Image (cartoon, helix red, strand yellow):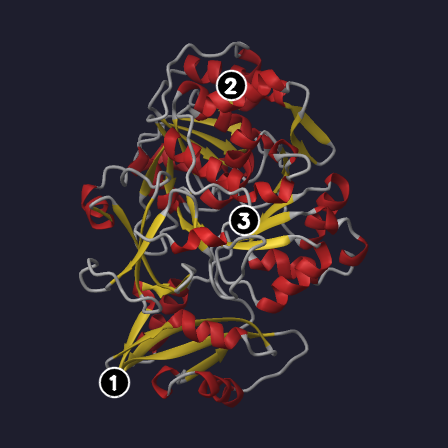
Amino acid sequence: MDRIWYKFYDEGVPHSIDYPGKAMRDYFNEWATKNPDKPYMIWGDQQLSYGEANSIARKLASSIIQLGYQKGDRIALMTTNLPEYVLLLQACFKIGAAIVPTNPMYTVPELTHQFKDSEASIVFAEDRFAQKVVDIMNNGTTSVEKLVVIPTAAAVQFPEDSRIFWYDDLLDKGEDREPDIPVSSEDLAMLQYTGGTTGISKGCMLSNANLEAIAWQDKVWFAPAFKEEGTTGIRDMAAMPLYHIYGFNTSVNLNMVAGGTLIIVNDPSPGSLIKNINEHEPNFFAAVPAMIYGLNNHPDIGKSKIRSIKAMICGSSPLAVEGLNRFEELSGAAITEGYGLSETSNVLTCTPMYTKRKIGSVGIPWPDVDIRIVDLEEGTKDMPLGEPGELIAKGPQNMSAYWKNPEETANTIRDGWLYTGDIATMDEDGFITIVDRKKDMMLCSGFNVFCREIDEVLYAHPKIQDACTIGVPDPKRGETPKVFIIVKPGETMTEEEVIAHCRESLAAYKVPKYVEFIDELPRTTVGKPMRNALRKMEKERREKAGQ
């Protein structure tokens, strides 16, 4: 394969990496030995050094073993961004257990599916969400048999129950010694469940080797921004949810090999982000567009310490050009935009920080990652440059399989290539542009129409703050586009304006037939617009109207 993208790598970024082949716990243990007094985590006005965090993780690992859990068991972690989440991750890595990161906002049915599928028998849960786990244990539909409650300011109480334990008690009873358990790079480290936006949520089997590979890719890609202090000087503002692969990888996982400091942010509101920036001066930040827009518009941004940030990555949904330019102007930092999936331990492509930027692109493949754009029918023929097709990828960070799901695994991994389900183009320089999800492609009068292409046109309108397109049934065309629009504060807009704007940039068959103005788009926990929720809402409306 002609890797045309290599010429745009920033200076010092290697084409390939010699991965040490170590288990993730070994990286943390080495930093704790080498820099025991260095701050590992900071939250609010508190902090833990590497040595202190390692001692706590050892005690937790000891108590988990005393509870009867061992290497290979699935252990669910269900909290918001708390230091305890990170400490429990390290404890699980130490005993070779497979972490099951769990969104605490999930409903009981969603949690039941994840616990049942993963066969997790113990859940560590933040107190304000723990009642959902109790309800699941009581209904007996999963293998969950123990709950460990993590106390917070919510101070939730539970009745005496032999199945319920408290985090602080486990910490008090644990022994401060490293578990004598062999853990290899090939052992399963995490079952990262997909968001479920494309069907039933599936468990992505990520090994220590997968996490090691992407951690090193993170480190070398962003290293040019930290030439003076090296990557050990990274002060990483962890504001993305740690239970999501994006938040985990760009904070905890990156710093397993970089040896930096984590600034744990539980509230990602603009005011909270500004407060953490002023108090702790992070130099690296992973974000979604909503965070950047919020910071750009915060009244105190101009007098903040925003210029402490040297590099950041933005993902999950497209970042408007004006938002990108404004933040870079305010901070002086280089914003990179990336693309990836839970199935790939997070990132596959990223824009270079300094060599070349193409607005609308998600960049070029990372070291050791190969990407092809193949036909949408069979997925075997490479498409010409510039022509849309399904993006497929190879790389050391790709999952081995979906947990207990050979049929979906066979559909997704073929001849060593992971089929992403995303439609993309590659240009003559190797830059990737995501066009849409395969399922978000409409067939209008026999023509392929991509929802995301219409979204991009809408984003360019100065009155539009956000937009999302779906396909709706049409008796003549099969499907036709409908757009949901959020207008910027202080602006007004009509359907006719939206349609006229689209006619300037889109072929007639792509122009939306329906426009609806709304106050808020349904989103995932990491900010992705949920087209499936809009489709469901629209379907229910039409059924009610007898359409």
- Secondary-structure class at tag 2: helix
Which residue type carries mark 2? Leu
Amino acid marked by disc 3: Asp
Q: Position of residue 397 (x, y in %)?
A: 37, 39
Residue 258 lies, with reference to residue 25, above or below; the image says below
Quadrant including the C terminus: bottom left
Q: Amino acid at mark 1?
A: Pro
Where residue 299 appears, as percent x and y from the top left, is: 77, 61
Q: Secondary structure at mark 1?
A: loop
- The residue mark sitting in front, 3 or 1, is 3
Nearest the eye: 204 or 543: 204
Res 318 seen here: yes
Tell me the residue at 23%/80% (across/down): 446
Q: Which residue is mark 3?
A: 10
User: Which numbered disc covers residue 60?
Assistant: 2
Q: Secondary structure at mark 3?
A: loop
User: What is the number of the mark on residue 310?
Assistant: none
Going from the N terminus, do you reach mark 2 or mark 1 first? 2
Horizontal and vertical percent for residue 54? 57, 19
Q: Quadrant of residue 538?
A: bottom left
